[in-house]
């Protein structure tokens, strides 16, 4: 059983169909001999839909193909064939770690406040979305500042997007400010009043990746500072971040494979979820946007599916 969850506009349906074939068409692309099953999403009034796909047993040596269909009945071409090997279902293989991932600052009891940079994943010529997260550990923090450094030859900056949950109009009512300290360091501030900031994402960095950027991890340095609700300086720590550059369309977390959950994220982007989500960075996946158009097409969903079926 493969499960996932959609969250998008209400009343939208989407189907992903899987087929098995005794042989593969000489073109390398699939036929659709035997229907295996489908992942179906129909969102409810709140925009949620659960999807489940039970993959039946498939003969070793046969070929798997897939199509994606949107709510208007537009169906993608059949994907390329993927031959079934010993693990004889198209279930996701265990994920393989190919680069060091964001070091989660596990914050022990009694630790001070921290403002951590996260990991963003993107392709050469694309963008990465890197969240910056406050863990107050009980401190009442009213304003933050982070000096965020990078190699400007590889990674540039188009902007910073405040988490809408703390933006003007919310109880925290915070303003975001950004300035350039030097060609490789940006200072980003969150503040404007003495209201405490709740734990969670402060803002997301939108970072264009050079077309010639090398595949792998590009570090982001982080020098944090903060003041409390009395206006006094308060000591904060902060983890460094990174941009993971990959060429695997749909590999939202940059671990080298596309999981069924990442296929679902590709579909949600196709349905209108933003490629960078400042309120919910775990939904961001700019690497699903293969042509850097700012959105994900049905053809790009098929690329995600192909990388799910055949690996990157
Ligand atoms: Ca992945
Ligand atoms: Ca696109």
Image (cartoon, rainbow, N blue to C red):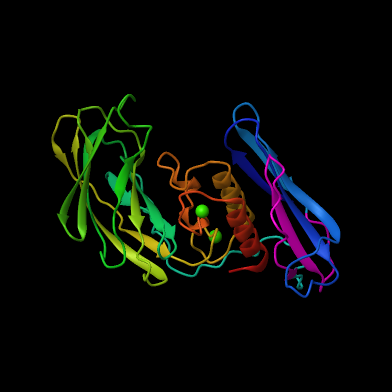
125 displayed left or right of 43: left
- SS majority, magenta: loop
Q: Residue at x 57, y 46 (%)?
A: 270
Measuring from the top left, give residue 21's x and y in whole percent. 83, 66
Tell me: residue 28, above or below residue 291.
below
- Front-most of residues 106 and 205: 205
Q: Quadrant of residue 189?
A: top left
95 displayed left or right of 1: left
39 displayed left or right of 277: right
Q: Residue at x 40, y 42 (%)?
A: 278
Q: Quadrant of residue 201?
A: top left
- Front-most of residues 116 and 214: 214
Measuring from the top left, give residue 125's x and y in whole percent. 40, 63
Q: Is residue 299 visible?
A: yes
Measuring from the top left, give residue 252's x and y in whole percent. 51, 56
Q: Is residue 111 visible?
A: no
239 displayed left or right of 123: left
Which span is picked out in magenta? 55-82
Magenta-colored stretch includes residue 63: yes
- Front-most of residues 310 and 141: 310
Measuring from the top left, give residue 311's x and y in whole percent. 62, 68
- Which quarter of the rendered picture does the C terminus lie within? bottom right
């Amino acid at each position: 059983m493969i499960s996932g969850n959609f969250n998008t506009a209400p009343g939208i349906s989407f189907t992903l169909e899987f087929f098995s074939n005794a042989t593969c068409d000489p073109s390398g692309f699939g036929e659709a001999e035997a229907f295996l099953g489908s992942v179906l999403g129909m969102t409810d009034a709140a925009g949620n839909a659960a999807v489940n796909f039970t993959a039946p047993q498939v003969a070793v040596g046969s070929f798997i193909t897939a199509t994606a269909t949107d709510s208007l009945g537009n169906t993608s071409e059949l994907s390329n064939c993927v031959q079934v090997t010993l693990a004889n279902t198209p279930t996701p293989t265990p994920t393989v770690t190919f680069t060091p991932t964001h070091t989660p600052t596990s914050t022990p009891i009694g630790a001070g406040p921290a403002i951590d940079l996260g990991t963003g994943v993107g392709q050469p010529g694309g963008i990465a979305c890197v969240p910056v997260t406050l863990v107050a550990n009980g401190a009442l923090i009213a304003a933050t500042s982070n000096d965020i450094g990078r190699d400007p030859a590889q990674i540039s900056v188009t902007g910073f997007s405040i988490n809408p949950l703390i933006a003007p109009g919310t109880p925290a009512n915070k303003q975001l400010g950004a300035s350039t300290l030097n060609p490789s360091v940006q200072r980003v501030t969150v503040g404007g009043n003495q209201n405490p900031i709740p734990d969670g994402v402060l803002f997301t960095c939108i970072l264009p990746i050079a077309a010639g950027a090398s595949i792998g991890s590009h570090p982001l340095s982080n020098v944090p500072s903060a003041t409390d609700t009395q206006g006094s300086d308060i000591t904060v720590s902060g983890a460094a971040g990174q941009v993971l550059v990959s060429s695997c369309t749909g590999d939202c977390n940059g671990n080298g494979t596309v999981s069924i959950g990442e296929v679902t994220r590709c579909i949600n982007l196709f349905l209108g979820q933003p490629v960078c989500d400042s309120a919910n960075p775990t939904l961001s996946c700019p690497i699903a946007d293969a042509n850097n158009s700012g959105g994900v097409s049905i053809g790009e969903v098929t690329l995600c599916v192909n990388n799910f079926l055949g690996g990157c």
